[in-house]
Image (cartoon, helix red, strand yellow):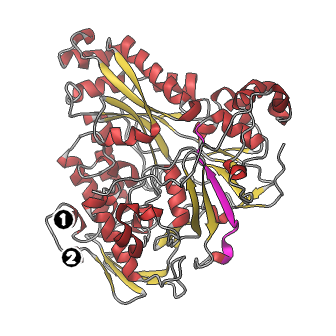
Amino acid sequence: MLRRRRLSSKGDTAARTVREDEGERKECRYRPMRLLAGCLFAAAGCILFAGCLHHEPPADLVIINFTEPESLDPAIVTGIAEMRLTKALFEGLLRLDGTNARPSPGLAERWEISPQGTIYTFYLRSNLAWSTGEPLTTADVVYSWRRALDPATASDYAAQLFCLKNAEAFYNGKIKDPAAVGIRALDSRRLEVELEHPLAFFPDVCCMPVTAVVPRQIIDREGDRWLSARPLPVSGPYELEAWRLNDKVRLHKNPRYWDASHTQSDVVDMLPIGSPNVALNLYETGLADIVWDKDLIPVELQEVLAKRPDFHAYDYLGTYFYRFNVTRKPLDDARVRRAFALATDRERIIRKLTHGGEKAAFHFVPDGTANYQSPEGLPFDPARARQLLAEAGFPGGRGFPRLQFAFYSAASGGAKLQGDLAIELQQMWRDGLGIETELRQIERKIFMGVQSRLEFDVCASSWIADYDDANTFLDLFTSNSGNNRTGWKNAHYDQLLQAANSQTDVHQRAQLFREAESLLVTEEAPIVPVYFYTGFNYFDPAKIEGIWQNLLDEHPVQSIRRIKARQTH
């Protein structure tokens, strides 16, 4: 199995140092926030970038991207921060349009669909080349998709390609010949993809990182060290100039990219910063241009910052929830899981903790998802919760084993809200069910592995839509999904999802999805939805252009540019 390897450069050091001298702090002018948040900025200090230490020229654009990437391999990344980077480096047949997050031509300039809706013919552009100059052909696409389906690659998103003919059987070892999978090169520019059945959102699948085209010429030679190769052949708008751990990922414009004339910034730095106070300080002092992610907004200042014209809130398809490990007793009992759900007061969490316009979630698929309306889930009903727990053999919580609730931490307090949510849930379950829970904070870099290996009792989770369709949420919990991470398997649920995705009538499809979601959040409850996210980021539109708010929080880096010179304080 390929290991997920983090890339480092010789001589790399921690990039950021904190200035504690009071005189230096006074040089940082915080404008409207100075009186309110001066103490927070003082704690963060003014940070020196490693670019200075490495004598690098400044980047055209500096983006704070939240966490250190676990990998830049598009076949195995699962986090939003990593996906932003892989999309800049590796492109697929299609890409998401930053204005509306809808599929648009990428490496393929056009495509045709058979009358039955099961065969797609893609036509690659005539000017495609790897950043290192070699021709990029349909053979590269076929290799990349087969690699993603190879169990040795360990792709959590491999199931997204099970819609291809024989793909699931190949993944499960029932078919050995990869040529039997429904993707083949007709010639160097024409590619045929055959599906098991019509799939309404297949163009969206073709935009996902798991379908991006990666360089076989390097992977075959370097194996799981392929991302260390220099120069690294890429298919996207940017080349990887440097990846320095706990410092930055520096991207440089790829002049051989098919759409290079519309790549707006030559050099982009993506900084892995987990502290909201540090992120805000860098932005306020002009050392960063854009801050993604709501986790990088100080909770204490959120209501004030939300009123500023450079802080942007928008509708967003994302859900915060918690998962059960149903392979552990007594969490294998659906009555116990439903009791937890009924004892969770979502409105209290929204009222006390989030402060960003979030909405309580009693179902999993967010409101506003295209062509879909979710069923009602389990309400807050502590009396019914206690009744179910007693029926399961634990009246008043007596005899119930002490559980651990796992949640992630990020560097320098970036996960403060996560900790507050954990404490609130712990108190609810103690008061409502008589159950004691230990809190287990896990470094974010290893948190996903803990989930995948089912090394938890209950854990905090979130999911952001990959595309605007209910399937991007409900497909997570099919039996073969690498993103399931609950141990829950239900044949009827799998059948409902398969039937829905074989259905061409949008109303009948939605009804099948509703049956599946009811099974997920009401009857079986391997997860408990808590609230729906509101999108939030900050940048000054008088200085930065090329960002459009959309339901998927999709902001292609190549579309963004600075229109006013950076001024630092």
Would residue 446 be found to the left or right of residue 33 on screen?
Answer: left
In three-dimensional space, the C-alpha distance between marks 1 and 2, rounded to whole angstroms, equals 10 Å
Find numbered disc 1 in the image and state the secondary structure of the residue it sits on. Answer: helix
Quadrant of the drawing holding the C terminus: top right
Residue 509: x, y in percent? 33, 57
Q: Is residue 47 above or below residue 554?
A: above
Which residue type does callout 2 highlight? Ala
Residue for badge 2: 180
Q: Is residue 421 above or below residue 257?
A: above
Of 484 and 217, which appears nearest the observer?
Answer: 217
| Residue displayed at 74% across by 43% down | 283
* Residue receiving disc 1: 169
Q: Position of residue 154 (x, y in %)?
A: 30, 56
Q: Is residue 454 above or below residue 516?
A: above
Dot 2: few (<14), some (14–19), or many (≥20) neighbours within 10 Å?
some
In-image side of 351 versus 137 (left or right): right
Dot 1, crowdedness within 10 Å: few (<14), some or many (≥20)?
Answer: some
Quadrant hosting residue 214 = bottom left
Residue at 83 percent of width and 58 percent of height: 564
Element at label 2? helix
What is the magenta range?
A: 261-274
Q: Is residue 267 magenta?
A: yes
